[in-house]
Image: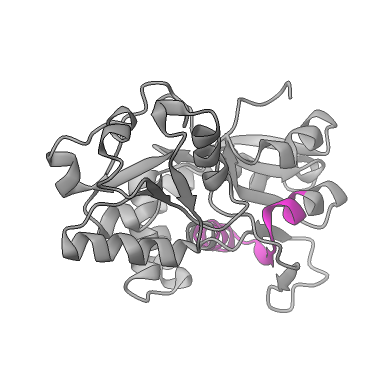
């Protein structure tokens, strides 16, 4: 792949069918744009923020919900206009050929400070377990188990690869795959009971706000050197001619991982709707949005 940087292993890619949530009476409206949203809490809230910003500028937005690969193919066909959750490294295989073929374009990064890796509780970190290189000597403490998320996810693939190549002497460890919710329940129990746990983590996510966790150093950069993890905005070819204002906004839209983690925490842990979170953010950033829509 020539036009992209190398890629992140992102949370699970699920095989969902495409579901379209239409804008109110906008089916034939040429000001309507369609955002592709995968089944991840962070992607859902970020899409709501971008949709609300576009709506405040006079556009109507349809939400197209599906697995990432389906949404990227939808952009190539012209059924989806843009996508805000292209993690690299991790999803590169799903869109790099489309970019090289000129069917999909990269608007740029929309997130500052994204990262992935393995993490432990704050208590374990303070006791000296601060690097992936520390795990092998503490195998019995962790039952030689890494907790991770949905089978087939990018997060699991990176950890499985580390085990397969005996990176950091983890060759005799195992990866226990489950759902994201189940993994985080295990982490929460470990925190309450002061037990040892090492698990797949990423930012942005509410875990970074609600749980006392620390990422382990990765001196061999298996999960990627600092700053290598990126989240890109993609848009279909032709959108720049039809809606230059939308593309101009997408090229400028960027938030921090801390900010998005707070959105996810409000949504997932405090039951605030993505629409309410988006409305608050748009109202509080009117000057910034005015510059982004110039």
Q: Nearer the viewer, residue 45 or 173?
A: 173
Relative height, residue 251 to residue 53 (above, below): above
Q: Nearer the viewer, residue 144 or 149?
A: 144
Answer left or right for 2 relative to 181: right
Asked if residue 244 can be seen in this view, the reply is: no
Tell me residue 241's x, y (percent): 79, 41
Residue 232 occupies quadrant: top right
Residue at 46 percent of width and 53 percent of height: 148
Q: Nearer the viewer, residue 163 or 131?
A: 163
Residue at 62 percent of width and 40 percent of height: 248
Please give the count of numbered marks on the rendered protein.
Answer: 0
Magenta stretch containing residue 234, yes or no?
no
Residue 264 occupies quadrant: bottom left
Relative height, residue 173 to residue 270 (above, below): above
Residue 182 occupies quadrant: bottom left
Answer left or right for 143 relative to 241: left
Relative height, residue 44 to residue 285 (above, below): below
Q: Quadrant of the N terminus?
A: top right
Relative height, residue 284 to residue 123 (above, below): below
Tell me residue 7's x, y (percent): 59, 32
Residue at 39 percent of width and 37 percent of height: 113
Tell me residue 272's x, y (percent): 38, 74
Answer left or right for 93 relative to 110: right
Tell me residue 235's x, y (percent): 71, 44
Q: Nearer the viewer, residue 100 or 169?
A: 169
What stretch of residues is rendered in magenta? Answer: 47-72
Q: Quadrant of the C terminus?
A: top right
Asked if residue 273 can be seen in this view, the reply is: yes
């Amino acid at each position: 792949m020539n036009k992209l940087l190398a890629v992140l292993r992102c949370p699970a890619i699920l095989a969902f069918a495409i579901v379209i949530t239409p804008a109110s009476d906008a089916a034939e409206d040429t000001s309507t744009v369609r955002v592709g949203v995968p089944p991840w809490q962070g992607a859902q809230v970020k899409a709501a923020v971008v949709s609300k910003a576009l709506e405040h500028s006079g556009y109507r937005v349809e939400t197209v919900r599906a697995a990432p690969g389906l949404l990227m193919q939808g952009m190539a066909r012209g059924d989806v206009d843009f996508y805000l959750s292209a993690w690299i490294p991790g999803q590169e295989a799903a869109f790099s050929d489309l970019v090289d073929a000129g069917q999909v374009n990269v608007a740029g990064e929309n997130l500052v400070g994204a990262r992935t890796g393995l993490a432990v509780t704050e208590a374990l970190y303070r006791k000296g377990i601060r690097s992936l290189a520390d795990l092998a000597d503490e195998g019995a403490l962790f039952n030689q188990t890494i907790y991770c998320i949905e089978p087939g996810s990018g997060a699991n693939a990176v950890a499985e690869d580390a085990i397969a190549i005996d990176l950091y002497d983890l060759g005799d460890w195992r990866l226990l795959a489950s759902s994201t919710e189940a993994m985080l329940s295990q982490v929460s129990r470990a925190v309450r009971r002061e037990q040892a746990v090492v698990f797949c983590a990423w930012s942005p996510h509410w875990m970074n706000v609600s749980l006392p966790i620390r990422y382990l150093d990765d001196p061999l950069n298996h999960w990627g050197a600092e700053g290598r993890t990126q989240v890109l905005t993609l848009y279909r070819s032709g959108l720049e001619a039809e809606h230059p204002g939308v593309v101009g906004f997408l090229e400028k839209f960027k938030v921090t991982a801390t900010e998005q983690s707070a959105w996810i925490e409000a949504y997932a842990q405090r039951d605030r709707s993505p629409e309410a979170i988006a409305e608050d953010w748009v109202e509080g950033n009117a000057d910034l949005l005015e510059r982004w829509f110039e």
